[in-house]
Image (cartoon, grey):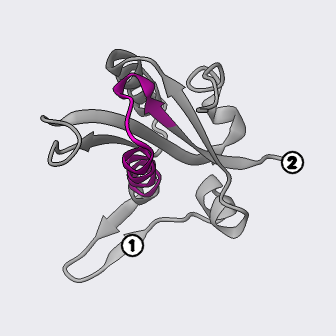
Amino acid sequence: MLETKQVIVVNKSLNMPTGKLAAQVAHASMGALLDTTTRNLDTIFINLPIGSAREDWLDGIFTKIVVYVKSEKKLLDVYEKALDRRLPCFLVEDRGLTFFDKPTYTCVGIGPCWNDEFIGITDKLRLLE
Protein backbone atom coordinates (compact mmCIF):
# COMPACT_ATOMS: atom_id res chain seq x y z
CA MET A 1 0.00 0.00 0.00
CA LEU A 2 1.28 3.47 -0.86
CA GLU A 3 1.75 5.83 2.05
CA THR A 4 1.90 9.59 2.10
CA LYS A 5 3.94 12.10 4.04
CA GLN A 6 5.14 15.64 4.06
CA VAL A 7 8.85 16.38 4.47
CA ILE A 8 10.22 19.59 5.93
CA VAL A 9 13.90 20.34 5.27
CA VAL A 10 15.61 22.73 7.70
CA ASN A 11 18.82 24.69 7.14
CA LYS A 12 20.55 23.58 10.34
CA SER A 13 23.51 25.94 9.84
CA LEU A 14 21.30 28.84 10.96
CA ASN A 15 21.18 27.59 14.59
CA MET A 16 17.65 28.89 15.11
CA PRO A 17 16.23 28.94 18.65
CA THR A 18 13.57 26.28 19.23
CA GLY A 19 10.61 28.65 18.95
CA LYS A 20 11.90 30.22 15.74
CA LEU A 21 12.57 26.78 14.28
CA ALA A 22 9.05 25.60 15.18
CA ALA A 23 7.50 28.64 13.48
CA GLN A 24 9.59 28.16 10.32
CA VAL A 25 8.68 24.45 10.11
CA ALA A 26 4.99 25.38 10.48
CA HIS A 27 5.35 27.94 7.66
CA ALA A 28 6.94 25.28 5.43
CA SER A 29 4.21 22.73 6.16
CA MET A 30 1.34 25.10 5.49
CA GLY A 31 3.05 26.69 2.49
CA ALA A 32 3.58 23.34 0.77
CA LEU A 33 -0.03 22.29 1.36
CA LEU A 34 -1.33 25.63 0.13
CA ASP A 35 0.89 25.40 -2.97
CA THR A 36 -2.03 23.56 -4.54
CA THR A 37 -4.55 26.38 -4.17
CA THR A 38 -6.54 28.33 -6.70
CA ARG A 39 -8.39 31.57 -6.06
CA ASN A 40 -11.31 33.52 -7.36
CA LEU A 41 -12.49 36.92 -6.16
CA ASP A 42 -13.67 35.79 -2.72
CA THR A 43 -12.61 32.17 -2.17
CA ILE A 44 -9.42 30.14 -1.98
CA PHE A 45 -9.72 26.48 -3.01
CA ILE A 46 -7.33 23.70 -2.04
CA ASN A 47 -7.19 21.24 -4.92
CA LEU A 48 -7.48 17.66 -3.68
CA PRO A 49 -7.98 15.37 -6.64
CA ILE A 50 -9.70 12.09 -5.69
CA GLY A 51 -7.06 9.43 -5.12
CA SER A 52 -4.23 11.97 -4.82
CA ALA A 53 -1.50 11.94 -2.18
CA ARG A 54 -2.92 15.19 -0.79
CA GLU A 55 -6.36 13.66 -0.29
CA ASP A 56 -4.87 10.53 1.29
CA TRP A 57 -2.68 12.60 3.63
CA LEU A 58 -5.55 14.80 4.79
CA ASP A 59 -7.72 11.72 5.38
CA GLY A 60 -4.91 10.06 7.33
CA ILE A 61 -2.60 10.98 10.15
CA PHE A 62 -0.70 13.96 8.64
CA THR A 63 2.68 12.20 8.68
CA LYS A 64 5.49 14.78 8.70
CA ILE A 65 9.22 14.14 8.68
CA VAL A 66 11.67 16.92 9.58
CA VAL A 67 15.18 16.50 8.18
CA TYR A 68 18.09 18.88 7.72
CA VAL A 69 20.81 20.16 5.45
CA LYS A 70 23.89 22.10 6.51
CA SER A 71 23.80 25.09 4.16
CA GLU A 72 21.56 27.43 2.20
CA LYS A 73 22.97 26.03 -1.05
CA LYS A 74 21.87 22.50 -0.11
CA LEU A 75 18.46 23.82 0.95
CA LEU A 76 18.03 25.50 -2.44
CA ASP A 77 19.20 22.31 -4.20
CA VAL A 78 16.44 20.34 -2.44
CA TYR A 79 13.89 22.97 -3.41
CA GLU A 80 14.98 22.90 -7.07
CA LYS A 81 14.75 19.09 -7.18
CA ALA A 82 11.20 19.21 -5.79
CA LEU A 83 10.24 21.89 -8.32
CA ASP A 84 11.77 19.86 -11.15
CA ARG A 85 9.54 16.93 -10.19
CA ARG A 86 6.54 19.25 -9.92
CA LEU A 87 5.92 18.30 -6.30
CA PRO A 88 3.97 20.68 -4.10
CA CYS A 89 6.67 22.65 -2.30
CA PHE A 90 7.33 25.91 -0.52
CA LEU A 91 10.59 27.71 0.22
CA VAL A 92 10.38 29.69 3.46
CA GLU A 93 12.12 33.04 3.36
CA ASP A 94 12.12 34.63 6.80
CA ARG A 95 11.71 38.39 6.46
CA GLY A 96 14.46 39.18 8.97
CA LEU A 97 12.29 41.07 11.44
CA THR A 98 13.20 39.18 14.63
CA PHE A 99 16.06 36.65 14.81
CA PHE A 100 17.79 37.31 11.49
CA ASP A 101 18.98 40.74 10.43
CA LYS A 102 18.09 40.20 6.75
CA PRO A 103 15.78 37.97 4.67
CA THR A 104 16.97 34.36 5.09
CA TYR A 105 15.93 31.01 3.58
CA THR A 106 15.20 28.71 6.52
CA CYS A 107 13.17 25.68 5.39
CA VAL A 108 11.55 23.90 2.49
CA GLY A 109 8.24 22.07 2.80
CA ILE A 110 7.54 19.30 0.28
CA GLY A 111 4.30 17.42 -0.08
CA PRO A 112 2.12 15.79 0.91
CA CYS A 113 3.31 13.24 -1.64
CA TRP A 114 3.54 9.50 -2.00
CA ASN A 115 6.61 8.17 -0.14
CA ASP A 116 8.39 7.07 -3.33
CA GLU A 117 8.23 10.60 -4.78
CA PHE A 118 10.86 11.74 -2.26
CA ILE A 119 13.50 9.29 -3.54
CA GLY A 120 16.51 11.25 -4.73
CA ILE A 121 15.35 14.42 -2.99
CA THR A 122 15.14 13.86 0.77
CA ASP A 123 15.58 10.13 1.31
CA LYS A 124 19.31 10.45 2.19
CA LEU A 125 18.85 13.37 4.60
CA ARG A 126 19.08 12.81 8.34
CA LEU A 127 16.31 13.48 10.84
CA LEU A 128 16.58 16.77 12.70
CA GLU A 129 17.60 16.23 16.31
Report crowding for label 1: few under 14, some 14 to 19, many 20 or more residues within 10 A (C-alpha): few
Give coordinates of residue 86: x percent, y percent.
Answer: 45, 37
Residue 21 magenta: yes
Left or right of 100 on screen, residue 34: right
Image vertical order of residue 100 relative to residue 121, above or below = below
Q: What is the number of the mark on residue 112?
A: none
Q: Secondary structure at mark 2?
A: loop
Q: Residue at x 66, y 48 (%)?
A: 5
Image vertical order of residue 54 relative to residue 44, above or below = above
Task: Read off the residue under disc 2.
Answer: 1
Q: Is residue 51 visible?
A: no
Name of the residue lying farthest toward the bottom: 42
Q: What is the number of the mark on residue 45?
A: 1
Give coordinates of residue 100: x percent, y percent.
Answer: 20, 37
Which quarter of the figure has residue 72?
top left
**Mark 1 / mark 2, whichever is N-terminal:** 2
Q: Which residue is at the front of the view, 5 or 48?
A: 5
Q: Secondary structure at mark 1?
A: strand
Name of the residue lying farthest toward the front: 17
Q: Which residue is at the front of the view, 72 or 41?
A: 72
Report crowding for label 2: few under 14, some 14 to 19, many 20 or more residues within 10 A (C-alpha): few
For the C terminus, the quadrant is top right
Give coordinates of residue 11: x percent, y percent.
Answer: 41, 28
Q: Is residue 126 visible?
A: yes
User: What residue range appears in magenta?
Assistant: 9-32
Q: Residue at x 49, y 31 (%)?
A: 85
Q: Residue at x 46, y 46 (%)?
A: 88
Give coordinates of residue 71: x percent, y percent.
Answer: 38, 17
The amino acid type found where label 2 is placed reads Met
Residue 2 magenta: no
The amino acid type found where label 1 is placed reads Phe
